[in-house]
Image (tube, coloured by chain):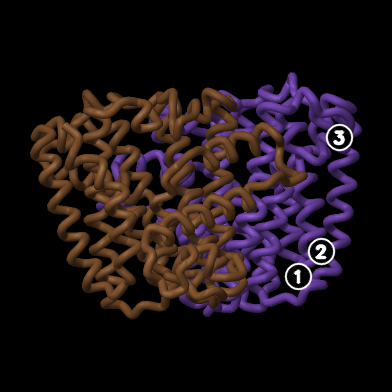
Chain colours: A brown, B purple
Amino acid sequence: MSSTSSLRGPDPDRGLAAADLAGVRLAVENRLAQLLAAHPGVPPNLQGAVRHATLAPSKRVRPVLLVLIADPDPLMEQSALDVGCAVEMVHTASLILDDLPCMDDALMRRERPTTHLEFGQSTAILSAIALLTRAFGLIAELSLVAPQTRTRLAAVLSQAVGWDGLVAGQEIDVNGREALVGAEQVENLNWLKTGILFVAAAEMGAILAGFDEPRIDAVRRFARHFGLAFQTADDLLDRSGSAEQAGKDVGKDVDKATLVSLFGASHARLTCEEHLARADAALGESGVREEPVRALMAKLFGALPASAS
Amino acid sequence: MSSTSSLRGPDPDRGLAAADLAGVRLAVENRLAQLLAAHPGVPPNLQGAVRHATLAPSKRVRPVLLVLIADPDPLMEQSALDVGCAVEMVHTASLILDDLPCMDDALMRRERPTTHLEFGQSTAILSAIALLTRAFGLIAELSLVAPQTRTRLAAVLSQAVGWDGLVAGQEIDVNGREALVGAEQVENLNWLKTGILFVAAAEMGAILAGFDEPRIDAVRRFARHFGLAFQTADDLLDRSGSAEQAGKDVGKDVDKATLVSLFGASHARLTCEEHLARADAALGESGVREEPVRALMAKLFGALPASAS
C-alpha cells in the first residue's frame, strides 16, 4: 500500500482504467484478509464464520466504487481501502442475515455454502454483528483521516444501514413484500435493499476525496441510479440465470414482487438501461475520474441484463 | 434537559445521591423514548420490536453508570444521555440476540415476552441490527462533543462489542460453554458477557468528563470489578431467584458452568463481595463523585446476592 501502483496498475498517467479496476479490487481483497487475520481473543468458530462469509469470491463492487471515487493519493490509499473494507463488512453482514432460515433460507452465497449452514445459526448471526461492529470501529480508528471526516463517514454509514435504510429494506423484503403494489413501491424496496448502501459507499468516497457539496450530490445521484440498475439486474439474473452464474441461490424471488415479476423482463431491462443512462450523466457532472468507473459499469452490466433473456 | 434538575433532583448542592440516581434513570428513559419515537420510514413491525425490547422495564445500569461518571454540566447533559442511550441500545441488541431460539431460547425478558416471540425471529434480528447501528450513529452525530472525542467513544464501544469482546462472550456462552474449566475461564466469560460493556460504559463516561489517563484507568478498574460482581449476582439469581424477581427466564444456566455451579452459591457470593470491595477501592482512586455511584451499587447489590440463599 505504499505506492500508487497497488491501486492504479502499471500506468502512472492513469490511462489504464481496466488495470485500475483490477488493482483496486486486489488491494481491497488483500486489505480485507489482513483486517480479518487470526486474532488470539477470537473464538475459532466465530473467526471462521467471519472469514468464510467475507473472504469468499465477490466482485467487491461497493468498496471498489468507493476507492475509485475517493481516487486517493498515496498517503490516503490505506484509509480509502479501510473505509471500503468497512462498507464491504457491512454488506457481508447483511448477506449473512439475508440468508438465514428465518429470512431467505438460502443454501449458497458467493459460491460457498451459506454461513449458517457451515457454522451454525448462532455463530452466523454473531459473525454479522462482529462485522458490523468492526466496520464502525475501523472508521473511528482511521488515524490519517481528520476526526470530523470520520464522524461524517460513520453518520453516513449508520443512516444507510439503520431502521429506515437497509434494515427496513430487509424487513419489508421478508415480512412485507406481499403488500407491495406498483413499480414505485418495488423501486423503493430496491432502493433500500441495494441503492442506499451503494449511495453511502459512493458518498463516503466523495467525502474522503474532499468534494464540495454539489459534487457530493452528483456522486449521490450517480450511485443511486447505478445501485438501482444493479438491483434490477440482480432480479433479472434471479429469473433467468443459473446458480453457478450467480454464485448464490436463484429463483428465491419467484413469488416476490419485483420489477421483473410485475412487468416482465423486457420492461425491467429498459428500467435498468434508463438507470444506467442517468448514472452516466450524473457521473459526468460529479467530476469523478470517469474511465475506471465506466470500466466498472461495463464489467458489471456489459455481460448481464441487457444481453440476458 | 435544559437544567441540572432533570439529572440531579431537587438539590443543587449535589448532596442527594438517591435523587441523582432516580433523576438520571428517568432522564435516560425519557431520552430513549424520544430517540425511538415513531419515524415515517420505519416499517411498523420493526419499530414495534425495537421499542418493545428497549423501552421495557430495566434498571438501565450501564447508561446510569455512564452518566454518573460523566457527571455532566448542563451544557453536556444531553450529550451524556445520548452516549448512555447508545450503550443501552447495544446492550438491548445483545439481549434480543441472546434470547433467540438458536441461542438461549428464552421466553421472557425485562418482564415482557422476548422480542422474537412477539415480533418473529427475522424482525427480532433486524431490530438488534437497527439498535447497534443507531448506537454508532448517535455517537457520530453528537454535535456538542469534539469530533476526536466522538471517534474515541466509537472506538471504545466497537472494541467492547467486537469479535474478541461481547460477541466472543456470546459465542463461547452458546457454543463453547461445555469446554470451560476452572474459575478463571468462567470469570473470563463473565468478563466478556458483562464486564466488558460495563467497562466501556464507564470509560465512555470518563472520556466525556475529560479525565486524564490515570483517572480513566481507575474508572476502568472500578467498572471491571463492578461488572464481574454484577454477572456473579446474576448467576446467583438465575439459581435461586424467581422469574418474577428477575424479570426474565431463570434456570437457563443450570447446565452451564458458572461460578455458582462450579463452586456453590456461598463461594460465588464471596467472589461477588470481593469484586465489590475492589470496585469500591478503585472508585476512590478515580476521583469520580462517589455518593451517587455508591447509591447505585447499594441499590443493585443491597437486596441481591449477599442476602440471597
Disc 1 sits on a residue from what chain?
Answer: B
Proximity of marks 1 and 2: CB atoms separated by less than 8 Å: yes
Position of the C terminus of chain B, as image quadrant, is top right
- Is residue B156 or residue B14 the one in the foreground? B156
Task: Identify whether A126 is placed above or below B73.
Answer: above
Marks 1 and 2, how far apart at CA = 7 Å
Mark identifier at residue A95: none
Residue designated by label 1? B288
Task: Identify whether A90 is placed above or below B252.
Answer: below
Percent x, y of residue A181: 12, 36
Q: How many marks?
A: 3
Q: Amino acid at mark 3?
A: Ala
Mark 3, Cα crowd under 10 Å, few <14 / some 14-19 / many 20+, is: many
Percent x, y of residue B241: 70, 28
Q: Are both tags, 2 and 3, on one chain?
A: yes
Residue designated by label 3? B268
Q: Secondary structure at mark 2?
A: helix
Residue designated by label 2? B283
Proximity of marks 3 and 1: CB atoms separated by less than 8 Å: no
- Is residue A229 or residue A10 the one in the foreground? A10
- Is residue B41 or residue A103 the one in the foreground? A103
Mark 2, Cα crowd under 10 Å, few <14 / some 14-19 / many 20+, is: many
Q: Secondary structure at mark 3?
A: helix
- Residue at position x 40%, y 64% in the image: A68
Whichever of callouts 2 and 3 sits on the residue coming sooner in the sequence is 3
Percent x, y of residue B121: 43, 29
As drawn, is B214 to the left or to the right of A301?
right
Disc 2 sits on a residue from what chain?
Answer: B
